Image: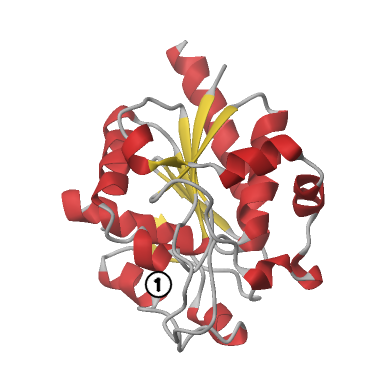
Amino acid sequence: MKKLLMILTSHADLADGTNQTGVWLSTFADAYYEFIKAGFEVTVASPKGGKPPVDPLSEESDYTTEGITTYHDDLMAKMEFGNTWSLDEVGSLVYDAVYIADGHGALWDMADDARLGKILYSCLLNNTPVAMVGHGVAATFALAKLRPDALSGLRITAFTDTEEALLKRHRHIPFSLTDRLKASGAQFTHAIIPFTPHVEADGIFITGQNPASAAMAAQELMGRVEVEQLFCG
């Protein structure tokens, strides 16, 4: 059975000190069910382990998806989400693919996590495909600490400054993800219309711009695994 590591943020608070953030729930649920339907064995992890925070905004009816609806009635998925492995526990294991979900918390706890950097560096060495969605793309900065040229010329997308402003989060985050990716040498792209699906694939990396891109990024990741196994098997 194909093994996939799904990584979620453990960080709960925005920079204003009053509003909460966490995992953007649809980017867990929508991708999770794509992987389960395709027969993947999914291990869910987070920097701290245990139950990660959920961004309250992502649970509002305006952002409900089919994946979220299914998740609310799925006891097994709730158990996996509520008891994630820590990155210390999964860092030495081998997976066929890695998926990193969206959530503003990733700007705090994924951008500088040395354990995550080592996981992604191992993926790079072993040609293991990695999909990242929205703020989860901040994980590339942890990789860049080990391999400074990792983002140079890389075609990539992520949550945009325009989307931050429309969500009214732009004043409450530690840095602009867009600006930092560009400063690291990445070729940043995005959809013309905010909050619409957009995915880029370059090398082992698949990046989705926003929550609407989660299922598409997951499907691209699964296709990449199938191709790798076809040629390597």
SS category of the residue bearing label 1: helix
Please name whichever residue, 106 or 97, is drawn nearer the observer in this view of the structure. 106
Q: Position of residue 231 (x, y in %)?
A: 46, 16
Picture mark count: 1
Residue 195 in view here: no
- Going 75% across and 71% down the picture, which residue do you hit? 60
**Does residue 220 lie above or below 136 as drawn?**
above
Please name whichever residue, 184 or 138, is drawn nearer the observer in this view of the structure. 138
The kind of residue tagged 1 is Leu
Identify residue for label 1.
Answer: 177
**Does residue 89 lie above or below 24 as drawn?**
above
Q: Position of residue 179 (x, y in %)?
A: 35, 77
Q: Quadrant of the N terminus?
A: top right
Q: Position of residue 162 (x, y in %)?
A: 54, 83
Tell me if mark 1 has few (under 14), some (14-19) or many (20+) residues whose alpha carbon lies within 10 angstroms of its own.
Answer: many
Quarter of the view holding residue 32: top right
Would you say 177 lies left or right of 180 here?
Answer: right
Residue 209 in view here: yes
Colouring scheme applied when the structure was drawn: secondary structure
Quarter of the view holding residue 123: top left
Q: Position of residue 140 (x, y in %)?
A: 33, 55
Quarter of the view holding residue 187: bottom left
Would you say 92 lies left or right of 95 here?
Answer: left
Q: Residue furthest top?
A: 233
Would you say 84 lies left or right of 68 here?
Answer: left
- Going 32% across and 61% down the picture, which residue do you hit? 111
Please name whichever residue, 146 or 25, is drawn nearer the observer in this view of the structure. 25
**Does residue 122 lie above or below 29 as drawn?**
above
